[in-house]
């Protein structure tokens, strides 16, 4: 399992971890939205037995085993667009997304 992080994403996650003192960041996909799936990206405190852990030193990602095929090989970036700042997923497995940009569909 491999997920790349840009320098901007690493810097923001380290700042966030220092401020909030969380144990893990859970990333994954869940069913929902008009395109079929939505990304999960949230602070978590508990590791489950079916989680894959990726250790980046100051923070760790938890990925449920069902999400691994959808996320393997993607890149997480942190971008600023006007007044908005957010983590952005670059995923070659995405086939389409809805007009609002919240949900995606995959080519797997």
Image (cartoon, rainbow, N blue to C red):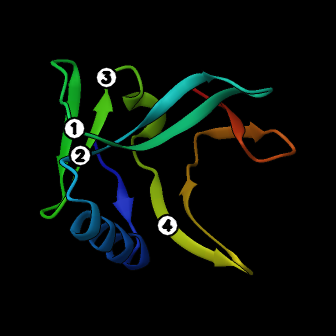
Give the camera-side residue of 24 and 55: 24
Q: Residue at x 77, y 40 (%)?
A: 97
- Residue, disc 2: 24
The quarter in which the N terminus is drawn is: top left
From what the image shows, is residue 81 above or below residue 45? below
Q: Tell me the distance, in whole angstroms, between the alpha carbons under discs 3 and 2.
A: 16 Å
Asked whether the beta carbons under mark 4 and mark 3 sit within 8 Å of each other, the answer is no
Q: Which mark is residue 77?
A: 4
As measured in the structure, the alpha-carbon distance from the residue carrying label 1 to the one carrying label 2 is 6 Å
Q: Quadrant of residue 16?
A: bottom left
- The reply to whether the C-beta atoms of the residues labelled 1 and 2 are less than 8 Å apart is yes
Earlier in the chain: of badge 1 and badge 3, it is 1
Task: Name the residue rendered at 37%, 65% in the picture.
Answer: 5
Q: Which mark is residue 45?
A: 1
Kindly state the secondary structure of the residue where label 1 is placed.
loop
Whole-number angstrom distance, CA of label 4 to CA of label 2: 18 Å
């Amino acid at each position: 399992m491999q997920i790349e992080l840009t320098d901007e994403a690493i810097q923001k996650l380290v700042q966030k971890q220092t401020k909030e003192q969380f144990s893990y960041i859970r990333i994954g996909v869940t069913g929902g939205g008009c395109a079929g799936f939505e990304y999960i990206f949230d602070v978590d405190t508990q590791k489950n037995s079916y989680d894959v852990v990726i250790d980046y030193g100051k923070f760790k990602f938890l990925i449920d085993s069902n999400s691994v095929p959808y996320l393997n090989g993607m890149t997480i970036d942190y971008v600023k667009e006007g007044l908005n700042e957010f983590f952005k997923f670059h995923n070659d497995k995405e086939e389409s997304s809805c007009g609002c940009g919240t949900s995606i569909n995959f080519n797997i």
